[in-house]
Image (tube, rainbow, N blue to C red):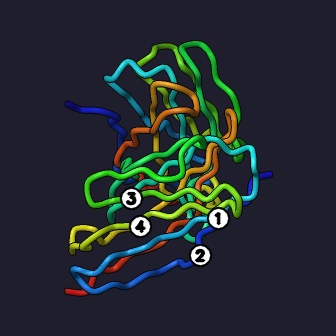
Amino acid sequence: GESVGLHLPTLSVQEGDNSIINCAYSNSASDYFIWYKQESGKGPQFIIDIRSNMDKRQGQRVTVLLNKTVKHLSLQIAATQPGDSAVYFCDIVTGNQFYFGTGTSLTVIP
Amino acid sequence: NAGVTQTPKFQVLKTGQSMTLQCAQDMNHEYMSWYRQDPGMGLRLIHYSVGAGITDQGEVPNGYNVSRSTTEDFPLRLLSAAPSQTSVYFCASSYGHSNTEAFFGQGTRLTVV
């Protein structure tokens, strides 16, 4: 089966700094990748996605990078704000199968 | 703009009791699914449905039943609750099965004593 992991279960950053959250996967056939944000007491919320025919996609303050060679996905948050404090999940989709990582808890220090 | 609505938000059950977690979406999504979220284990798929009248098992289906009589509703039934089913449950819906992002409900925190 798919192996999905995150490099760090927790991450603390100073307000205003950039944050990088990582996710590794094992199946080279994975073709769609999604990042979700989950605030305390709420359900996961879509942030950004990327398909396997791309290696970078940018949103508002967020960038997702995909390195298919090493099967690595990252989420970059620019100028991190207190409202970015949450758990971030990657969702790795392979055909009609999808796997969620265990999540990285991001804490923003004022 | 309701999205995905789950009820109840909190529930305490005694071992052996049964109950139904409700999930409704108003986005006309064909695909709906149920997950459980446990500490350190991420989201695990329980059951899913690709359309009304069609359901299938996910990664951890034992102890749970589902049905999909309408596009909007996808209830999850616990037939005989066990302490191992203590978890936070999320319902999600999406346009497609696996090629678009999912919209999640707010979750149901279930405790089985």
Q: Residues within 10 Å of mark 3 (few under 14, many from 20)?
A: some
Classify residue B73 as left or right of residue A17. right
**Which chain does the numbered disc 1 sit on?**
A
For mark 4, what is the residue? A87
Toward which corner of the image does residue B77 lie, by quadrant? top right
Residue in the image at 67% along x and 33% along y: A96
Classify residue B95 as left or right of residue B97. left
- Same chain, labels 2 and 3: yes
User: Taking B54 as reference, is B84 above or below it?
Assistant: below
Residue in the image at 54% along x and 52% along y: A55
Toward which corner of the image does residue B82 lie, by quadrant? bottom right
In this view of the protein, which residue sits in the foreground, A64 or B17? Answer: A64
Question: How far apart are labels 4 and 3 at the CA level?
Answer: 17 Å
In the image, residue B53 lies at what x, y percent? 59, 13
Q: Nearer the viewer, mark 2 or mark 4?
A: 2
Q: Nearer the viewer, mark 2 or mark 3?
A: 3
Q: Which mark is residue A63?
A: 3
The secondary structure type at the circle numbered 2 is loop
Classify residue A78 as left or right of residue B39. left
Q: Are marks 2 and 1 in contact (CB under 8 Å)?
A: yes
Q: Amino acid at mark 4?
A: Val
Q: Which mark is residue A7?
A: 2
Answer whether residue A4 is visible to the viewer in this image. no
User: Taking A62 as reference, is B33 above or below it?
Assistant: above
